[in-house]
Image (cartoon, rainbow, N blue to C red):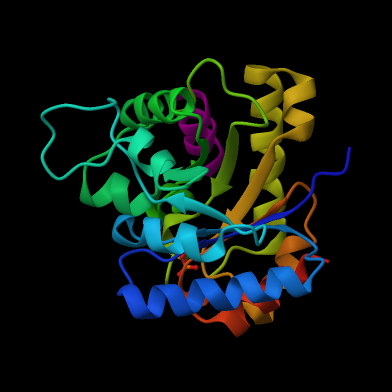
Amino acid sequence: MARRPLIAGNWKMNGLKADGVALAEAVARKVKAGPAPADVLICPPATLVDRVAQTVAGSGVAVGGQDCHAVQSGAHTGDVAAAMLKDLGASHVILGHSERRTNHGETNATVRAKAEAAHAAGLVVVVCLGETEAERDAGRTISVVESQFKESLPSGTNADNTVIAYEPVWAIGTGRTPTNAEVAEVHAALRASAAKVLGAAVADRLRILYGGSMKPSNARELLAIKDVDGGLIGGASLKVDDFWAIVEASR
Ligand code: PGA
């Protein structure tokens, strides 16, 4: 079955009000001028979700958070609940990004608990997984991503409430990418894991994105790989022309 591509921008910890609104406006203008060949999602920092959601309202651009807490409210200073993101107009949330796994000690179990909370709040989760360079060098890539897949997704996961993003840790922000064959191998393994864990019908519809140094110059070939259903874009999502070139490359 044909899966509609999703191109998602992960702004990370970048942008004050003025830049965020300007970038969101520019993306919304592109989508409105469309038709875009892909679903388009932008994930600003939590401080900008409200403004960005208001800015793109009605344009067809979806807005997501970059993390949420595993419980819905309470004594968790500095954290943001899934329902709060939803309340601001977010429809998605990125979970388990390698920067969260590394900098905040998030494990597959943490990601799973957060995904459960996000699903309960009605958000679509974009669950990130991927091997480190040491794991790849040790020949463990497939077993690592398979266990991340199995352990990070809560029961109730389906193709409507979940998107997977394969992001090799060593490719994020480095300008390095796996070969097309390496990407194809991981995506095929993830599709097979999905069939095993979630059933063939869900696996067939589940979107599996590639992320890690995707940019205008390599997007077309990465997006053409079998089982790659879009991209999660960091650095290149901060410039509308680069981000849009990637959206266009999914055509
Ligand atoms: P990058 O980041 O595109 O800057 O490599 C991707 C990501 O971390 O989601």
Q: Report the residue at 37% width, 50% height from top.
A: 98
Q: Is residue 88 above or below residue 247?
A: above
Q: Report the residue at 80% width, 63% height from top.
A: 37
Q: Is residue 148 above or below residue 249?
A: above
**Residue 135 is covered by the magenta coloring:** no
Residue 54 in view in this figure: yes
Give how far across and how far down residue 84 sits, in percent: 33, 39
Direction from residue 172 to residue 18 in the image, left or right: left
Quarter placement of the C terminus: bottom right
Segment colored magenta? 141-151
Q: Nearer the viewer, residue 222 or 245?
A: 245
Residue 175 in view in this figure: no
Quarter placement of the N terminus: top right
Q: Which quadrant would residue 214 be assigned to in this image?
A: bottom right
Give how far across and how far down residue 154 sits, in percent: 48, 20
Q: Report the residue at 57% width, 58% height from top.
A: 57
Q: Which quadrant would residue 21 be assigned to in this image?
A: bottom left
Q: Nearer the viewer, residue 1 or 133?
A: 1
Q: Which quadrant would residue 117 be assigned to in this image?
A: top left
Q: Report the residue at 13% width, 34% height from top.
A: 76
Direction from residue 120 to residue 79 in the image, left or right: left
Q: Nearer the viewer, residue 83 or 189?
A: 83
Prevailing secondary structure class for the magenta stretch in the rendered image:
helix
Direction from residue 193 to residue 145 in the image, left or right: left
Q: How many marks?
A: 0
Give how far across and how far down residue 104 sits, in percent: 21, 45
